[in-house]
Amino acid sequence: MRRHDIFFTPGPSELYFTVDHHIKNALAMKIASISHRSNEFQEIYKHTSEQLKNLLSLPEGFKIFFLSSATEVWERTAQNLIKDSSLHIVNGAFSKKSYDAALKSGVKNAQMIESEWGAFPNLDSANVEFEPEVINVVYNETSTGVKADMESVYAMKNKYADSLLMVDVVSAAPVIDLDYNIVDSIYFSVQKCFGLPSGLGVWIVNEKCLARGKEIELTGTHVSAYHSLSSMEKQAENYQTPETPNMLGIYLLGRIAQDMNEKSLDLISNETKYKNIIISNAIKASKCLELSVRSEKLRSDTVIVTDIIDEVVFGDLSDELKKRKLVVGSGYGQQKGKQIRIANFPTHSKEHAMMLSDIIEKY
């Protein structure tokens, strides 16, 4: 039975509007049946890599690898880039999970600088106990709707010149503004802003990361039997992967990235900001909702998080949203039942954003 819901959930979310077309083409071309060692797949990998480099304005020297998810990158980082120490800037559930993953992966000295949910840590006054090999920050904390203060992150990175700066851009890419002279690696999954089915992660690293990976591999400190940086780099030279990858996902990502390039990232970014203003203004007019991130500077462009301040009126709003087939996300973890999260991804049209906003401001 066909569903007609419009998903404003923060991932998985509404599919990008051209995905249906690309899936039909992929099935017709039997993309899911070809060999991952074939010339045809090499062309798919190359096309996707080139489109992403263009879309994200990646400088020369950055390599693109495909994994199972962004979550996998946490473990691969610990195995490939860290001998002893990592620093995690924590202001929500997912930034905390990266810290937990480092501990579970055997990082001896993992430290977190933490703030309450809805805020961002004061890095200027932070007491860092050691020089970290890796600094990990979430550009857009999906659980709280907070956008990182990257200027303060850059200032911290400059204090530790040998550290690698890893940026989780899961619920922000491609609508990101980063200085790749300072950032060493970014990573994301495809089920959020790219509007694709889940099951594919993208890890992008520079030459400093690759050199660190080789250095650690030679010491035997950590052994990554699966998805070592060196094995991924070697295979990527021929536009291949160490294992049989999610070929359909890689194909679809390349096509969506091409669609976005043809539309232009500037237009996508401007539309994202416009929709954010519309939805945020509706929340400000609402009787039952309130923006949870108090600092306007820290409010995410792509995940809008609200506190529920009147449960009775919110119940009426929920009923109306269900009637209109509009699905928003619930609060995450400790905020479930206390907040809602509204995705504002490239797939969400201005018309749908206005429809949602018209309903919210009436309640």
Image (tube, rainbow, N blue to C red):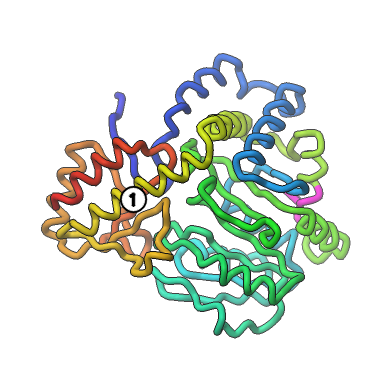
Q: Residue at x 33, y 38 (%)?
A: 350
Query: In the image, residue 68 lies at what x, y percent?
Result: 60, 44
Q: Residues within 10 Å of mark 1 (few under 14, many from 20)?
A: many
At a point 84% along the width and 57% down the height, the residue shown is: 214
Q: Is residue 41 magenta?
A: no
User: Is 161 positioned to the left or the right of 319 in the image?
Assistant: right
Q: Residue 195 appears at what percent x and percent y?
A: 46, 38
x, y percent for residue 80: 75, 59
Count the numbered circles shown.
Answer: 1
Label 1 secondary element: strand
Does the rendering let one see residue 2?
A: yes
Point out the stretch of residues depicted in magenta.
224-230
Where 50 falls versus 270 (above or below)? above
Q: Residue at x 72, y 60 (%)?
A: 79
| Residue 283 % position (x, y) | 24, 56
Q: Nearer the viewer, residue 257 or 339?
A: 257
Q: Residue at x 17, y 38 (%)?
A: 323
